[in-house]
Amino acid sequence: MYLSIGNDMSVRDTSVIGIFDLDNTTINARGREFLENAEREGQVVPCDDLPKSYILTTEYGFNRVYLTSYNTSTLEKRFK
């Protein structure tokens, strides 16, 4: 199955590692460092709108961070 993450994008539900709130994870230094490293390595897929959360996925040995304008509760409902 696939998880719709907005902007006509979907990810395979089996590749999802986690769904994280952007505000809560960027409060501490580790969260900011993780996102900075992912962006520097070209793993971040941005959204067109103001991002509220991000989805960490791994597929075929590649990690991706998808920024999305949906909040975590909406994504969780879609995931179930």
Image (cartoon, helix red, strand yellow):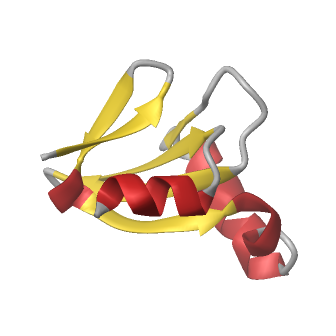
The image shows residue 62 at horizontal and vertical percentages of: 27, 51
* Rendered position, 40 above or below 58: above
Residue 58: image quadrant is bottom left
In the picture, the quarter occupied by the C terminus is bottom left
Camera-nearest residue between 75 and 11 = 75
Number of numbered discs overlaid on the protein picture: 0
Q: Residue furthest right?
A: 27
At 38% from the left and 26% from the top, the residue drawn is 9
* Rendered position, 8 above or below 63: above
The image shows residue 70 at horizontal and vertical percentages of: 61, 44
Q: Is residue 60 left or right of residue 20?
A: left
Residue 35: image quadrant is bottom right
Camera-nearest residue between 78 and 12 = 78
At 78% from the left and 73% from the top, the residue drawn is 24
* Rendered position, 52 above or below 77: above
Camera-nearest residue between 15 and 5 = 5
At 78% from the left and 33% from the top, the residue drawn is 50
Residue 63: image quadrant is bottom left
* Rendered position, 44 above or below 56: above
Q: Is residue 18 left or right of residue 20?
A: left
